[in-house]
Image: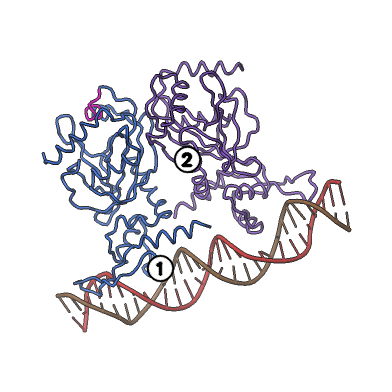
Chain colours: A purple, B blue, C brown, D red
Amino acid sequence: MHPSDIENMETQEKRKDMLYSHVSVDCVLLGISEDQLSVLLVERSDVDGNKIGFKLPGSLIYDTETLDEAAYRVLNETTGLKRISLKQFRCFGSPSRTKNKDDLQWLENALKLNKVSRIVTVAYLALCKNTRKFNPSYKYDEAQWFKVDQIPHLPFDHKEIIEAAVQEMRAWMEKEPAIVFDYLPSKFTAFQLRRTYEIIYNKEMDVRNFHKKMNSLEYVVPTDDIQDGVAHRAARYYRFDKVKYNKQRSKFNKN
Amino acid sequence: MHPSDIENMETQEKRKDMLYSHVSVDCVLLGISEDQLSVLLVERSDVDGNKIGFKLPGSLIYDTETLDEAAYRVLNETTGLKRISLKQFRCFGSPSRTKNKDDLQWLENALKLNKVSRIVTVAYLALCKNTRKFNPSYKYDEAQWFKVDQIPHLPFDHKEIIEAAVQEMRAWMEKEPAIVFDYLPSKFTAFQLRRTYEIIYNKEMDVRNFHKKMNSLEYVVPTDDIQDGVAHRAARYYRFDKVKYNKQRSKFNKN
DNA sequence: CCAAAAGTGTTTCTCATACACCCATGT
DNA sequence: ACATGGGTGTATGAGAAACACTTTTGG
């Protein structure tokens, strides 16, 4: 066990009596792996510690915590990330979501409760950086990216949640274009930005029109950096200017 | 007490042990009164039956019920309406939403529970017909429309929920234009449709451009009916064609 | 000099906006 | 005949979409 795990466990123990065992949050963390839209899933173990598959990273909420705080806690426990945008997008609360006996059994073991009643879950969404190897001090040491069209069997209604999340992601990006930059590195090429859009929308985009559009966005600013050591003309790096973004947004929203 | 109230109470008694006292639904039923966007609120009584103000129509969920079912139940108990679109738009779950002592006291009385813990509420939204007088067999005999910029003091975070709902309403109408027809009568004039938009968006619209736009929508079809007995040129009635709407939508969504 | 990706302009079409007058009807 | 609201057309500008060639660099 990694030293910091003990610390985490202690924190959890201290707060355990304050777990509110009726409402959970689940995070659909979308990213890109091998040029395809992917979701980060964590490994699930049975009572004996055997790995029995994957699930969305999630948690019951604590009594003192808002839903957003719980979601950020889960995000951080899973990826170590902190400052990215998380959006609450839907609440899943069908009584039949825990109808599968194995899922229910697992829940009762995991939560150390005799009888788990219905759990309503609030689903959150983020587009997040593809941190390749997660810091083992985080709660889950096994987190893996799965392409959204190759999702393994998942417990509860997690598959349905992921499907809804992919739809929601596209709508969210229209409203709040800044979220792509949660995914991209701080310096990125026009190609990277375009590819990200293409993968999320699952649609090719015209290169020239894309450049034109990008240049019209004041908040995507060219830097003096260019690529190095590539076997073709070097691409320019751009960066996201948050201040300019907020200005342009507020101007836009006044109408 | 109205005879049907007894029936309702019996139904409630039967199901009482199945109330899931951790999650509720609240419905923001928007409509128009006196040419202004308004919300339907129901009267709230204290333990002695004294009326102590208004609140959003809402309810704890039953164990056997999905969230959507609970929301439709509340809609129906409040207005008698059944077949309108309700949209789940956000979950409100801050632990501080029940921080007001009076609100908490009221809750405990209303729910006949000794100790109410945190309640997470799932907020729903609808644009609904302005049924002027509600059938007294419905659960609340006092329901009133309040203009959204003249909301009285409300318990919990209901004011915040209404504000979020108004924003959401506009976004929803862009995505799903059909919902205005939940509000309008089955035959309506161009003026009524335009006024409805103007009030919801709080913005005047050009008459000619509106007609042009409306005529381009295949699913708004002119009928042969025209107004009768008005002291000016009679307006034509239009109707909403749901079949054509779905066709046009699915065509649009394929791209 | 060749392969490989970067970068750049013009035309066309659609859609939103702005704007003013005649029409039908009841009193 | 007049008051009242219903209904119509045209011109302009902005932004989306379609489309092909030259530039730069490493090997």
**Residue A146: where, in percent of width, then height?**
59, 37
Residue depicted at x 62% and y 36%: A130
Q: Is residue A136 visible?
A: yes
Mark sitting on residue B209:
1
Residue A243 vertical placement versus B11 (above, below) = below
**Residue D18: where, in percent of width, then height?**
62, 65
Mark 2–mark 1 distance (CA, rounded to whole Å): 41 Å
Quadrant (top left, top right, bottom left, bottom right) of the N terminus of chain A: top right
On screen, residue B51 versus residue A62, left or right, reads: left
Mark nearest the camera among 2 and 1 is: 2
Mark sitting on residue A160:
2
Residue B134 vertical placement versus A145 (above, below) = below
Within 10 Å of disc 1 (Cα), the crowding (few <14, some 14-19, many 20+) is: few
Give the chain letter at badge 2.
Answer: A
Magenta stretch prevailing secondary structure: helix
Asked which secondary structure carries label 2, the reply is helix
Quadrant (top left, top right, bottom left, bottom right) of the C terminus of chain A: bottom left
Please state the extent of the stretch shown in magenta in the rendering.
B107-113
Residue B63 vertical placement versus B32 (above, below) = above
Within 10 Å of disc 2 (Cα), the crowding (few <14, some 14-19, many 20+) is: few
Residue depicted at x 50% and y 18%: A11
Mark sitting on residue A158:
none
On screen, residue B187 versus residue A193, left or right, reads: left
Query: CB atoms at circles 2 and 1 under 8 Å apart?
Result: no
